[in-house]
Image (cartoon, rainbow, N blue to C red):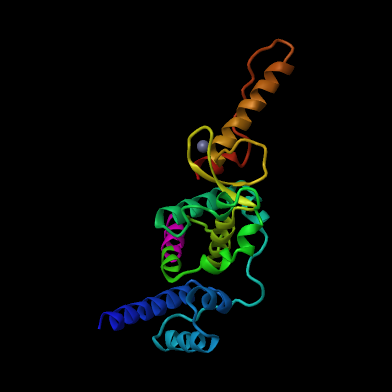
Amino acid sequence: MRIYDDRYERERLRFQVAMHFIRLEARTRTIRLWTGLTDDRIRKLYRSYLCDGERPLPRHRGRSPHRVGMFLRTARLRQQTSMLASLCRLSGAAPEHPAASEHPTAPGHAAAAGFTLTLPSLMRGAQLCQAYEVYRALTPEPMLGFEHAVFLLTTLAHANELVYGVCRDCRATVVVDHWSLRPARCTVCAAEADVELTGRRATASSPTGASARPSLPAGRESVAAA
Ligand SMILES: [Zn+2]
């Protein structure tokens, strides 16, 4: 009886996670990878979702996001990426020990060892949905879709290109380039550091040596407030 109950609970969770992924507009391939359902079963679920009177969802086709550079391209993206990554940690979706830290001498070893096959799981999928929905609720203009969240979690788990860091000034969790030599800073502290640096340069170049601390450059106000 116990075995039957466990199996029933697992199937129920599989169904719930798949429906959650559908609502968040995940691609069929992503749903298949994270739930183990067949494409045919996913199509049936999608049809039942529509029959329940839910709003029609756009079906995204083509490749899922695959360039990590976009996460760090602008201050706003960096801020949102760090927030989403923090929520992945809080929800339990992010593995406690990224692959690279387990294999520090061989960053590519994790994939070879089959790590990509063990990252997706029903529980982690449910936690990722939770993290992503909180991110959407807290962000006035979200720039990252659910497929970005899946890609970010996978990238951070491998720890080959992007890794978790800590802002050197305020200790906030940030996402940084694994190979960057610059100290990790959140967007707010980075903007303040830029202002400090500009002020020092202006003072040094001033003939009187008077302090010429500038105000925040255009565009920084919104970053600092974010
Ligand atoms: Zn900071």
Count how many numbered circles sit on residues in the image: 0
Vertical arrangement, residue 37 with respect to residue 163, above or below: below
Q: Residue 203: percent from the left, percent from the top? A: 68, 17
Q: Is residue 226 above or below residue 120?
A: above
Residue 70, given in percent of the width and then of the height, sits at: 65, 56
In the rendered structure, the answer to whether residue 87 lies left or right of residue 4 reads right
Residue 106: image location, x then y, percent: 66, 52
Q: Quadrant of the N terminus?
A: bottom left
* Residue 177 belongs to the span the image colors magenta: no
Give me the residue at 36% from left, 77% from top.
Answer: 10
Name the residue furthest left.
1
Q: Is residue 143 visible?
A: no
Q: Quadrant of residue 134?
A: bottom left
Res 4 → quadrant: bottom left
Residue at 67% across, 42% down: 180
Q: Is residue 135 above or below residue 11?
A: above
Q: Quadrant of residue 49?
A: bottom left
Query: What residue do we see at 49% from left, 88% from top?
Result: 41
x, y percent for residue 209: 69, 11
The image shows residue 205, relative to residue 147, as above or below, that is: above
Decide whether residue 134 is among the magenta residues: yes
Residue 204 seen in the current view: yes
Q: Main secondary structure of the magenta part?
A: helix
Which residues are the magenta region?
Answer: 128-138
